[in-house]
């Protein structure tokens, strides 16, 4: 007999152990009863926990939104690599062909 292949008896034994373990764990109804009793016993703790969860979730959403907005803003701004496009060259050429006022006629900001 091959020792790596479990026999029917070994399978039944493993199933019985799993069944005993499942019987020792709490049922869903017991968990709900415990939660309701805990809420009745300490309403302030429950309220503070709920408030903390709401604040934490809202702050996480806020931080992600700010990050995504910043990324979108950064992508919309021109970068040095986009300055070498043909459209940018035309803008530079048209800006250099305009006459610039002489320094004596320009107003100084101070």
Image (cartoon, grey):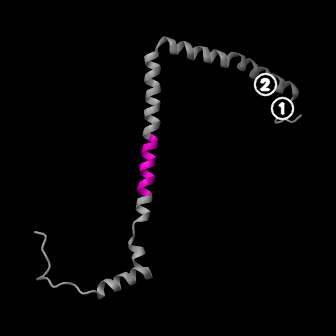
Q: Quadrant of the N terminus?
A: top right
Cα–Cα span, label 1 and label 2:
10 Å
Which residue in the structure is indicated by mark 2? 14
Q: Are marks 1 and 2 in contact (CB under 8 Å)?
A: yes
Q: Which mark is residue 6?
A: 1
Q: Viewed as shown, does residue 21 lie left or right of 12?
A: left
Q: Tag 2, which secondary structure?
A: helix
Magenta-tinted stretch: 60-71
Q: Which mark is residue 87?
A: none
Across and down, in percent, residue 5 comes to 84, 35
Quarter of image, res 76: bottom left
Q: Is residue 52 magenta?
A: no
Q: Quadrant of the C terminus?
A: bottom left
- The residue that appears at 66% across and 19% down in the rendered structure is 28
Q: Is residue 65 magenta?
A: yes
Can residue 85 be seen here?
A: yes
Q: Is residue 60 above or below residue 39?
A: below
Tell which circle, 1 or 2, labels the residue nearer the N-terminal end.
Answer: 1
């Amino acid at each position: 007999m091959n020792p790596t292949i479990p026999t029917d008896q070994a399978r039944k034994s493993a199933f019985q152990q799993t069944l005993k373990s499942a019987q020792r764990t709490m049922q869903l109804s017991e968990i709900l009863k415990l939660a309701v009793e805990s809420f009745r016993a300490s309403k302030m703790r429950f309220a503070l926990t709920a408030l903390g969860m709401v604040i934490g979730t809202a702050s996480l959403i806020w931080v992600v939104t700010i990050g995504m907005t910043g990324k979108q803003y950064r992508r919309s701004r021109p970068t040095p690599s986009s300055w070498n496009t043909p459209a940018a060259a035309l803008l530079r050429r048209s800006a250099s062909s305009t006459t610039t006022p002489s320094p004596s006629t320009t107003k100084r900001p101070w």
